[in-house]
Image (spheres, helix red, strand yellow):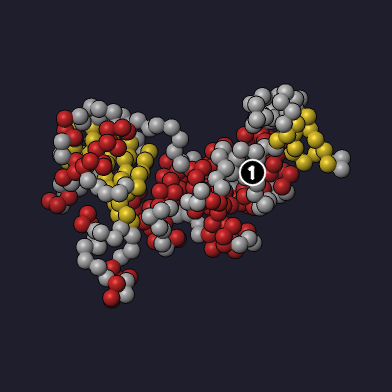
Amino acid sequence: MSNVGKKISAFKSFSHMLEVLDTDKTCREFLEKVRWNGVPICPHCGSICKDHYKLKAKGEFKGLYKCKYCGERFTVTVGTMFEGSHISLRKWFIAIYIFSSHKKGISSVQLSKDLGITQKSAWFMLGRLRHCFQSKGNIKFTGVTQADETYVGGKNKNRHYNKKIKFSQGRSTKDKTPVFGLLNNGQVSTAVVPNTKAKTLKPIISSMVEEGSILVTDEYVAYYGLETKYQREIVHHNANEYRTERGFSTNGLEGFWSLLKRGIYGIYHQVSAKHLDKYCNEFVYRYNTRTETDSERFCQSLINAEERLTYKNLIGKA
């Protein structure tokens, strides 16, 4: 284990991280420790070997290796969201720590000021981070699961008088984007959906919730018929009921919706339907890791940085 690894097994605070990871070199060494556990792994052939060749430039080693087996060159950033970036690794680390620890996120405008980069670059960095925050693998919930939907978009009271529209609130809304969510044992999963009809929501529930589980919903008609597969608990919100006779509620998931909307409206102000799923990933990641320390979440974020998202893919161009 390197000295860097020993010093930063856990950061006490953001300022402590800045003190320890004070150069790109220490950041690179820490990334090698977190991702490789100190033993280089060739991203081309997958070989794990401490004897991979270290290539030097003007007598100095700067993290470039040559695989002992396939002969390809690589660094610890190859195959990660850091690959090909002209932004220094230390600035990336600062962005990750801030982004993962701030409960409601940070805007690209503010991040660009903090890092001294353009707003476009900051927006791209945040896009790559959200991409790495998405859930990997199939999730299957068992036990008590809450199900609910929400709608993300502007409010009539904030629109110009000639741009106000009818039916802008509740499930009858026509100008907002629906998001469906499940909450089980403190873990949330969300999906941006085209509508909240039964044909859209039921397949998601069937694929993610084990049959026979307790499913807590409100009285919305789209959930009718789920009693055949689940022990359905219905919270009658229209009757001012917020908990069933057996004590079940959807309060946990509604609390997450509140956090999501406060972040979107208060920090980001406006999110397009095209990118809404990425912002949901961001809030889901922080919510699901809320019991971890900022340092633990930061290190986990570095481990999750396994995929490089190009700018063209981010904006939806081939």
How packed mark 1 is, by other alpha carbons closer than 10 Å (few <14, some 14-19, many 20 or more), is some
Where residue 191 sits, quadrant-wise, is: top left
Q: How many marks?
A: 1
Residue at 32% from the left image edge and 54% from the top image edge = 177
Report if residue 31 is visible in the image.
no
Q: Is residue 90 above or below residue 304?
A: below
- The image shows residue 15 at horizontal and vertical percentages of 63, 52
Residue at point 20% right, 29% down?
A: 229
User: Is 182 in front, or is 160?
Assistant: 160
Residue 107 in the image, given as x and y percentages of width and height:
50, 59
Please give the name of the residue rendered at 12% of the width and 51% of the height, measured from the top-left corner.
Answer: 239
Residue 219 occupies which quadrant of the picture?
Answer: top left
Q: Amino acid at mark 1?
A: Glu
Where does label 1 land, which residue? 83
In the image, is 170 to the left or to the right of 87?
Answer: left
Q: Residue furthest left?
A: 239
Instruction: Give 61 or 192, whichever is nearer the viewer.
Output: 192
Farthest residue to the right: give it. 59
Task: Name the one closer to the observer, 243 or 94.
Answer: 94
* Element carrying mark 1: loop
Residue at the spot x=25%, y=68% of the render? 165
Residue 34: x percent and y percent? 62, 35
